[in-house]
Image (spheres, rainbow, N blue to C red):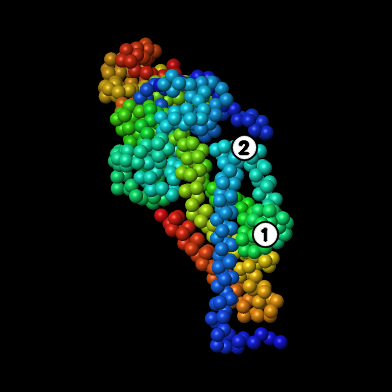
Amino acid sequence: MGFDWSIMATPGYWPNMVHVLTPALLETLYMVIVSTVLAYIIGVPLGVILVISSPGHILPTPWVERILGTIVNIFRSVPFIILLVFLIPFTRKLIGTSIGTTAAIVPLVISSAPFVARMVESSLKEVPYGVIEAALSMGASPWQIIYKVLLPEAKASLILGFAITTISVIGYTAMAGAVGGGGLGALAIDYGYNRFRTDVMLITVILLVLIVQGIQSIGTSFARKLTSH
Amino acid sequence: MIKIEHLSKTYTSHKGNVVALEDISLEIAQGAIYGIIGLSGAGKSTLVRCLNRLEEPTGGQILIDGQDITKLSGKALRETRQTIGMIFQHFHLLQSRTVGENIAFPLEIAGYKKNKIKPRVEELLQLVGLADKADAYPSQLSGGQKQRVGIARALATRPKVLLCDEATSALDPQTTVSILNLLRDINQQFGLTIVIITHEMKVIKEICSDVAVIDASKIVENGPVEQVFIQPQSAIAKEFISSVFPNELPGDLLRELATHADSEIIRIHFLGSRASDPIIADLMKDCQVRANILYGSIDHLRSTLFGTLTLELQGSKEQLAKAHTYLDERGLKMEVIQNGI
């Protein structure tokens, strides 16, 4: 028995669809924006420390790099869906509940922050060390090198990394939806899978594709603008 | 001004130790343009990088204006670095900043106020001849222009010393000359001491007042440029000099000349006004020797004339001895290359 697509032509279908989609879309945006921002607040300093503590950089400290690197790797190797379940007690302790959109942000941040750290690390490593040495020769402090050389010089690469991170967080929010996080992912599963509403699934997927495309295009064009001169 | 005493640098790794500098002692006078020349791997880059501690020396002292910079750390080191400018082979400009912003960079680091930075940047752009490029990005500039930005940036905080690490090695010969001229102007205008690391004798010849030759981690020879050019002691120095003043005679010619009886081959070096004296005519007239010109060249060593002349002198033992005395009396440096008597 195939899906009856003529339903889409019935009066009241689209207003009703908008009514269903809007809250889910807002939930997704809420989760993506808050998680990405928090992941960057944690991930950028981690990425910076990973770079500057590496051998031959401005503050080589092998033990810091090793410990931090190991922690980052551990969190990155746990599949998100497992992390989601594993963190339930922690989430409950932190915000009082383990269900809902806000609760989903906790595992989202914890799994994306290490990802951000690695993205930032690889962007900052692209800055030629000669430029850093030039700054050192002028008497720049480590802090000045971070915010006047490393971060500005890696700006284009950081923006591309930001687009990639945001897109992967969108993917994670869909998974978080499966365990009560809400958003477009939950909608697709609730309606599309459990209630055989292929149309809802399709529209949700199209919406996600559009969001991802949009973010990638904006990121790419920003990065290009920064490197075009 | 700069006094390097028993400086050494050894790199330690799990593969073993590599000696980069061994017991280096040098004195660089205020206002000098001091060239340090060596082949790649000789240790010259390590040496100049020790002067602002981009490289940590493993032994010895470096006194700049009486202050031992090997003992500095933290803030004191950073403040001292602000008094030592540096330019690089590959310029190392900030790609995300415009030319003007690149020049402002060391001023920001040194904590200059915004209203002090702008006029200083304009002054420096004027100095290096890039007043119209303030808003261009480094990627839009030629190599020579990038190095001009590098120079302006290095001079921004009015340093006492300018270190040049192979600053012209990535440039074509014409651009090299224009950059060297700029460095000379700066040296004369501000009395800035300049230390130049290079593998090109041409650079030493054009602008240096003093030169040190470094080979296999050691200084093999140093002194005023004229002295080293006229009387090189080491094989490596001779080799470097022959790269800008080729004066080797072809081997088969030397063998043929060796068969001549009562003759010798000599090389005379001229410096300054001596270059315009009628030496050969006088030699032939006063000493009755016959002179056969085999090779000659004349060029500038900085702003003085520097020439060499290779002659075959023919005559009796007495006549040749008289010729030697004649040259000695005129203060001309002479060496006998081949003696056929």
Of tags 1 and 2, the one toward the viewer is 1
Indicate whether B14 appears above or below A117.
above
Disc 2 element: loop
Judged from this view, the residue extending furthest toward the front is A96
> B203 or B144: which is nearer to us?
B144
**Residue A31, horizontal then vertical, whole percent:** 59, 62
Residue under the image location 30 percent in, 18 percent down: B283
The residue that label 2 is drawn on is A61
Q: Is residue A168 visible?
A: no
Residue under the image location 38 percent in, 28 percent down: B160
The tag on residue A144 is none
The chain containing the residue under callout 1 comes to A
**Residue B4, horizontal then vertical, whole percent:** 48, 21
Q: Quadrant of residue B291?
A: top left
The chain containing the residue under callout 2 comes to A
The amino acid pointed to by label 2 is Thr
Along the horizontal axis of the image, is A225 left or right of A74?
left
Bin the neighbour count of mark 1 within 10 Å (Cα to Cα): few under 14, some 14-19, many 20 and up.
some
How far apart are the two marked residues, 1 and 2, measured between alpha carbons?
Answer: 39 Å
Residue under the image location 66 percent in, 85 percent down: A3
The residue that label 1 is drawn on is A97
**Residue B102, horizontal then vertical, whole percent:** 39, 43
Indicate whether B267 appears above or below A153.
above
Along the horizontal axis of the image, is A145 left or right of A92?
left
